[in-house]
Image (cartoon, rainbow, N blue to C red):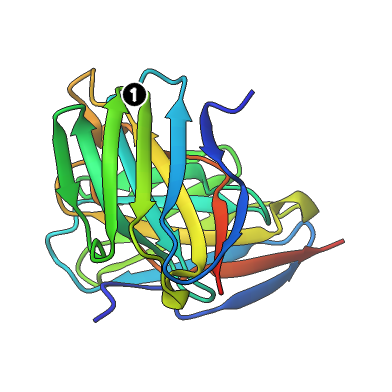
Amino acid sequence: DQQVKQNSPSLSVQEGRISILNCDYTNSMFDYFLWYKKYPAEGPTFLISISSIKDKNEDGRFTVFLNKSAKHLSLHIVPSQPGDSAVYFCAASDQGGSEKLVFGKGTKLTVNP
Amino acid sequence: DADVTQTPRNRITKTGKRIMLECSQTKGHDRMYWYRQDPGLGLRLIYYSFDVKDINKGEISDGYSVSRQAQAKFSLSLESAIPNQTALYFCATSDSSGGQALLSPQHFGDGTRLSIL
């Protein structure tokens, strides 16, 4: 039973446009959510996080939105750049921190010049 | 310089062999984790350690063991490797020293690609 779902294995966008990556979760106890970016042959790199007490968090070109009632979060990248091409993982924790993360399967983003 | 270093980066071995994957960190973090990633899947937690004397099983600990030799070192062992343990293995660290684990994401090494024939 997959608790964190990223239903789109891949996404392709044009440079300069918005990229929207989606993530759904089933465990209502999750209270902390993170996005990681992964390039080939490298480990995942932390991108941005949000706690359940918020519905939005911004960091530069990256914004994460959380809709607790729908158990849905999304990552917006504006504007998208070719260097953003990577696999993006959504992760969630139910212990008020990142001690035990549950990951989605990832979405491969390709930003075309 | 990598803050979380995994060795080896690649390993090919045979069924039944004992394998040890090592992880060391210079970040000064107290918490360490081992994950595996299979193709098309997300990362799954194998074991985690909140300090040297604290070891906990994760989602998929069967067939694995760990040792936290020091705050900076956390090794993963496969006592008798089997082909379905072929995967990409990641070590991660996080910091709870500020009492705000909520604000401390996990930081990952670059992984060990393990192939068991």
Q: Residue at x 36, y 64 (%)?
A: B80
Residue A54 in view, yes or no: no
Residue B96 in view, yes or no: yes
Query: Relative to the observer, which residue lies in front, A68 or B114?
Result: B114
Please state if B54 lies on the left or on the right of B61 as rendered.
left
Q: Residue at x 38, y 54 (%)?
A: B35
Please state if A74 lies on the left or on the right of A19 as rendered.
left
The image shows residue A53, relative to residue B96, as above or below, that is below
What is the three-letter code of the residue carrying label 1?
His
Q: Position of residue A94 (x, y in %)?
A: 16, 53
Identify the residue position indicated by label 1 in the image.
Answer: B29
Q: Residue furthest right?
A: A113
Chain ID, mark 1: B
The image shows residue A37, relative to residue B39, as above or below, that is above
Q: Position of residue B49 (x, y in %)?
A: 22, 38
Please state if A66 lies on the left or on the right of B12 as rendered.
left
Q: Position of residue B3 (x, y in %)?
A: 53, 26
Please state if A41 lies on the left or on the right of A49 as rendered.
right
Q: Secondary structure at mark 1?
A: loop
